[in-house]
Amino acid sequence: MISETKTIQESALHFRLRWLKKQIRLIVLMTWRNLQVDFAYKFQLLVDLSWIAIDIAIFTIWGGLIGEAGGDTGLDATTYLLVTVTFWVWLGKAYDDTILALQDEASRGTIGYLVTNNISVNTILVARFVASTIKTTIVTFFILIPSLALFGVVDLGSISLQAGIIVLLSFFISWLFMLAFSTLVASLTIVFKRIGALAGMLHAGLKIASGYYFPLSRFLGDDVHPLVRGLIKISFLLPTTQGAEITRRVLGGGNYSVATLLTRLMGLLIGTVLMIVLAFLVVYRLTNLSRYWGTLEQY
Amino acid sequence: MSKEENAIIARKLSKRFPRKVFPRLEYFDVLRDVSFSIKKGERVALIGSNGSGKTTLLKTMATIYLPDSGDLLINGYDVYKHAEKIASHTTLISPALDFQKKLTLRQTLRFFHSIQAPYGELDIALDFLKRMHMEYLLDKRLESFSEGQKAITRIAIGMMKNPDIFFLDEITTGLDVNRKEDLVDFLKENISSEQTIVMVDHDPLIVERICDSYILLSRGVVVKQGRAKDIGKELAYKYEVMVIMKDRPEFDEIVMLFPDQADDVLIDGHVVYFRAEDEDELYSIIERLRLNRETITKYVVSLVDLSNIYHALKPETINEIRTVEDEKGLPERTPTFDELQEIIRLFGIMIDTKSGVKIPPRKLP
């Protein structure tokens, strides 16, 4: 009896592992297909690069106008904003591409082929996010961060091993959070079709909360309305704000202690786990609903 | 018959789509209480006018849609529980399905071959492309393909999966006459007797050559399921004579030239169809044709086949079978057999309770 139960448990585990292996293989194949398509649109790649260059120029000027980042950051506003821009260049493009992924596949008529070949909505979205991350990683880690280091905005040499590991972990967990968040928002497309405005609003909200446009810590003084102060404090709890804050403090050379970085990392991790669970439930429910309503191929 | 002998079993299958979501969810029915079974290796044509639910039924069987009620077993797998297994063993080929046009034909084939693993067979697709004289396009991007070439690519991908069941939706759309012929030959040669075909096509000649049975749908209801070889028993005539006239004829003109066949004629542009119940009537029609040979280009005599179901659909007969409608004209429920019989009587079709639907020859209005 015990050995029979053990055999059943082993075969269930074997089945799960085989399923996981298959899903990873499908994500890799879909990611490769997305990259093949992305690199076929060379003009678009050029536009993306130009957009980043414009962002850097604008935020350099804007940072100069603001002066100090404020709060306990110990950073000037230019460094604060440029490191935040780098953080969002890395994550934001993948979010934008993922939001459009289902609409793009449906409008081209490719989604039906994918679904009848066992590529799920989840796989399509995850593969899109991974492919875009690969593209933007090339831009951020090989072009943007070295450029910022060259101009003295980022001081890579001053980063300790511990802080380096924490910042890499925060990059990874922030990436997981945005992957889950993008999947959740993009999955709304299969039922509600045009969600561009909502997706843009949520993206802008996360960026503002993480200090993309201006350092929010400047608005925590006593002269600010208590409601605004409360909202800002809530925004500090968002996982992307935690991730951006760790990146700024470490890469920008601001004030930090390893203990505070670890506290932020823990907040980031909890928020990410919650988002993954929520995204999984929403995508599962909406995919089923779209199969009942026949909306999967519509756009 | 055991469950395993059937490739597809549908019992009281219904599918509806939302007409309006806000402020109140309202639906319209597309399939209602559809029941049928298809044996393994059978080649079935889904026949019906536009909007009768053929493509929805195909997509439901291909797991793109989920039924709202009823049972649907594909290869013994329940469509609600085992969609992934069903998708692995079936293929849907439809003009609504498309590809990433920036990829080449070779990249596209490799991609689908990889995701279809371990079932896909690349050689089948390559053989098919060679047969269709398209192997020289392997390294061209799909954006430069004509509609016909895209149609062939779709079929190549579907064939490559080497599935147990093919769901073919208008696969000949965009193909020229020669390629249609090549396609039919390829399908007949390469689809084994174990593989099942369920197809929708508006070209009766293609369907007639591929399929051996049919399911007749009207307004989401299965009106009739039968075998092609039994069509003669279902229809009130055995022979059809297709006559191509030199000039577009008027109905009165035909009545004057063929007075005995005035009630058994169907006119479609330059083409006139006569129907004969037996050999005597057939010879009488041919005699008339010989007498009037200066007015005709050619004529073809054939036994009734699946294409005659399409002709029967044409003069607003079966496609006018109405479902019971509410005061707003919206479909409310499936008609009872007696109601259906009355509707069909009104529209000029008789139902024989023993042998099923009988479609008498009739003239176009």
Image (cartoon, rainbow, N blue to C red):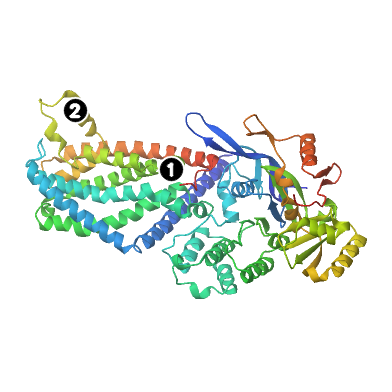
Residue A174 appearing in the image: yes
Q: Residue at x 73, y 61 (%)?
A: B208
Toward the right, the furthest residue is: B280
Categorize mark 2 by other alpha carbons within 10 Å: few (<14), some (14-19), many (20+): few
In this rendered view, identify the residue nearer to me: A72 or A260: A72
Estimate the x, y position of residue B353 in percent, counting from the top left: 85, 41
Which of the marked residues, 1 or 2, is nearer the chain's N terminus? Answer: 1
Categorize mark 1 by other alpha carbons within 10 Å: few (<14), some (14-19), many (20+): some
Estimate the x, y position of residue A201 in percent, counting from the top left: 30, 39
Residue B306 appearing in the image: no
- Which quadrant, please, contains the N terminus of chain A? top right
* Chain to which the residue tagged by mark 2 belongs: A
The answer to which image quadrant residue A255 occupies is top left
Estimate the x, y position of residue A42 in percent, counting from the top left: 31, 63
In this rendered view, identify the residue nearer to me: B263 or A51: B263
Q: CA distance from mark 1 to mark 2?
A: 34 Å
In this rendered view, identify the residue nearer to me: B163 or B257: B257
Q: Residue at x 50, y 41 (%)?
A: A290
Label drawn at residue A193: 1
Toward the top, the furthest residue is: A226
Q: Amino acid at mark 2?
A: Val
Residue picked out by circle 2: A228
